[in-house]
């Protein structure tokens, strides 16, 4: 799976090299048999999150993280001057609320198969501003930070690429436990627990 990180916001300073490493580590949980060709993680602010949310799901309020999929011939992130969001999800793709204490949305992701040509591109759109705000709130309740929150959003998006579906409450709880375990694994490897600056930087 090819990985691409695109930072489309400037309100929060982000270490994109570190984010790429998180994504690379988390993507190890996606079996090769799933057949995803490309994963693009888009880092956005509230304004663009609301814009994308509106185009994809008809709700213009900003949200924390969204997961979408496209066929390469439908929408290419490498098309110069073209927004990858020009193509709306298929009518068969319907939104569903994902996280117990968040607002994650996903289309009904089309799953790659051995006969799928061309391969599908997965897109995880992450609201960095929301991660910063929620991470600060939760930091008062224990070892948590904006980095943890951002990593959790990414982990949730990647969990969907494994085939997980949290439309059923019991499955949603399983996903959350699994994603928290993945984020704790990043703690050990990527020093997520180092002291956080008082500014809004996430680097």
Image (spheres, rainbow, N blue to C red):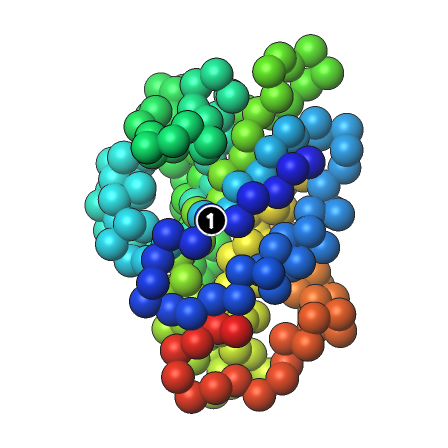
Q: Is residue 70 above or below residue 52?
A: above
Residue 10 spot, x, y in % from top left: 34, 63
Query: How many numbered marks, from 0 up?
Result: 1
Choose between 141 and 111: the one closer to the eye. Answer: 111
Q: Quadrant location of the N terminus? A: top right
- Density class for disc 1 (Cα within 10 Å; few <14, some 14-19, many ≥20) is some
Q: Residue at x 65, y 37 (%)?
A: 2
Q: Could you say which quadrant of the image residue 147 lies in?
A: bottom right
Residue 58 spot, x, y in % from top left: 25, 36
Choose between 186 and 18: the one closer to the eye. Answer: 18
> In this orientation, does residue 134 appear?
no
Image-based side of 51 in relation to 130, left or right = left
Q: Could you say which quadrant of the image residue 130 lies in?
A: bottom left
Q: Is residue 11 above or below residue 98?
A: below
Q: Residue at x 60, y 15 (%)?
A: 118
Image-based side of 43 in relation to 49, left or right = right
Residue 39 spot, x, y in % from top left: 58, 39
Q: Is residue 64 above or below residue 124?
A: below
Choose between 141 and 49: the one closer to the eye. Answer: 49
Residue at the disc numbered 1: 6
> In this orientation, does residue 6 appear?
yes
Q: Residue at x 50, y 39 (%)?
A: 123
Q: Residue furthest front?
A: 80
- In the structure shown, which secondary structural element does the residue marked by tag 1 occupy? strand
Residue 70 spot, x, y in % from top left: 48, 26
Q: Is residue 25 above or below residue 54?
A: below
């Amino acid at each position: 799976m090819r990985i691409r990180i695109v930072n489309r916001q400037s309100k929060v300073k982000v270490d994109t090299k570190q984010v790429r490493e998180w994504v690379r580590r988390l993507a190890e949980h996606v079996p090769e048999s799933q057949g995803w060709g490309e994963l693009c993680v888009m880092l956005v602010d509230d304004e663009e999150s609301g814009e994308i949310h509106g185009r994809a799901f008809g709700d213009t309020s900003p949200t924390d993280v969204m997961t979408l999929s496209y066929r390469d011939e439908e929408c290419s992130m490498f098309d110069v001057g073209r927004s990858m969001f020009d193509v709306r999800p298929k009518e068969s793709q319907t939104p569903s609320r994902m996280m117990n204490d968040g607002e994650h949305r996903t289309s009904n992701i089309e799953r790659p198969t051995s006969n799928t040509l061309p391969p599908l591109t997965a897109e995880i759109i992450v609201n960095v501003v929301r991660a910063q705000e929620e991470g600060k709130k939760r930091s008062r309740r224990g070892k948590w930070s904006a980095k943890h929150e951002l990593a959790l959003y990414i982990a949730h998006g990647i969990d969907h690429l494994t085939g997980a579906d949290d439309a059923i409450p019991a499955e949603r709880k399983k996903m959350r436990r699994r994603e928290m375990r993945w984020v704790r694994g990043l703690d050990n490897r990527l020093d997520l627990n180092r002291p956080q600056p008082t500014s809004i930087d996430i680097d």
